[in-house]
Image (tube, rainbow, N blue to C red):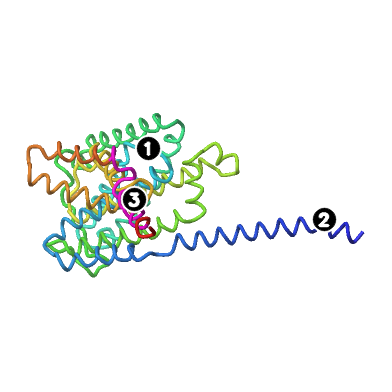
Amino acid sequence: MSNAVASKSAPENSAAAVTSARTDQAMAWFAGRVRWSWPEIALWVAALAIAFLFPSRALLFNEIAILALFALSLDLVLGYAGIVSLGHGAFFGLGAYVAGLLAKAGAGAGLLSDPTFGLLIAGLICAIVGYITSFLVLRGADLTRLMVTLGVALIFSELANRMAWLTGGADGLQGVMPGKILGLFEFDLFGRNAYLYSLTVLFLLFIVARKVIHSPFGVSLRAIKGNALRAGAIGINVNRRLNGAYTMGAAYAGVAGALLAQTTAFVSLDVLDFHRSADVMLIVIFGGVGTLYGAIVGAAAFKVLYDLLAAATPQYWQFWLGLVLVVLVLFVRGGILGLLSNVQARLRSGGAK
């Protein structure tokens, strides 16, 4: 009798040991992914240092930081959830108008004018709108999702145009007067405080996104993107995960739009224009889809290349920019980060020989 019990418990103990080993491997994998590498640390230190090394270019750096956060929001939706969107600029514009209206109502004083309060409200409202619209977006396949997101963006743009009594219409929202950041730091004329403010917000939200992507939730998103049917078959709630990712991306885009409104003290219909959605998709592809850092690298490269080409060839800069993007997409798989990874792999293989 005891031998029979022992024979039955042996497979159970073996299965438990295998499960425990796999759990330990998974935990080790997560720990390794979450650990910061020295290139990551160097990137953020450099981003902070340039504010003091090149103070005259702070306005440009501020635009890059805002664009990087906007691209990061789309990377969460496209790169990890696999939702193709041509209307992501709707949340960017909505966040800009929310922050602008709050700053205008506060008239430079009080809680309503506090930029951090404006960021929180803009992000919250965009998250709510993103969650509601996510049910419409997820009802169809890729092409349907593409058209739905584009349609939502067009609706938001037309509403902002028609509601001129609230948004200012074609003339833009006048009287946007953001107060001091946390009641301590005022936006200066040269834009250094604005850049440090945008960089801080970008860094904090990047940390959150990084933790989410390297969590079991992020792993489930990768599984869904790879094969949604198989992910559902193993017990993953596909729609709930995609709703969460889309909501998070909408909130991030709203915060990016709020940063633009606060640091420029102006909001116009341009924040809802189609080119916002198109440009941010190009930036994500340019830097590398599904990498997080591709959004930052792509935003910096895109903006610098944009300024250089516009200054060198004012009449044909769009042609050259388009040519660079086409060449990169066709011949460099994975964008700029993909190119850097290939170079690093070749250097390692060469060193090993």
Calculate the distance from the C-alpha at mark 3 to the C-alpha at mark 2. Answer: 51 Å
The numbered mark at residue 84 is 1
Which class describes the residues within 10 Å of circle 3: few (<14), some (14-19), or many (20+)?
some
Q: Is residue 174 above or below residue 228?
A: below
Q: Which of marks 2 and 1 precedes in the sequence? A: 2
Which class describes the residues within 10 Å of circle 1: few (<14), some (14-19), or many (20+)?
many
The residue under the point 7% across, 37% down is 315
Identity of the amino acid at label 1?
A: Val
Which class describes the residues within 10 Å of circle 2: few (<14), some (14-19), or many (20+)?
few
Asked if residue 336 lies in the magenta stretch, the reply is yes
Which residue, given by chain and number where applicable, does mark 3 sit on?
342
Magenta stretch: dominant secondary structure: helix
Q: Helix or strand or loop: what does disc 1 sit on?
A: loop
- Given residues 102 and 327, the one toward you in this image is 327
User: Quarter of the image holding residue 158?
Assistant: top left
- The magenta segment is 329-348
Residue 336 coordinates in the image, percent (x, y): 28, 49
Residue 239 relative to residue 344: left or right: right
The numbered mark at residue 8 is 2
Residue 199 relative to residue 35: left or right: left
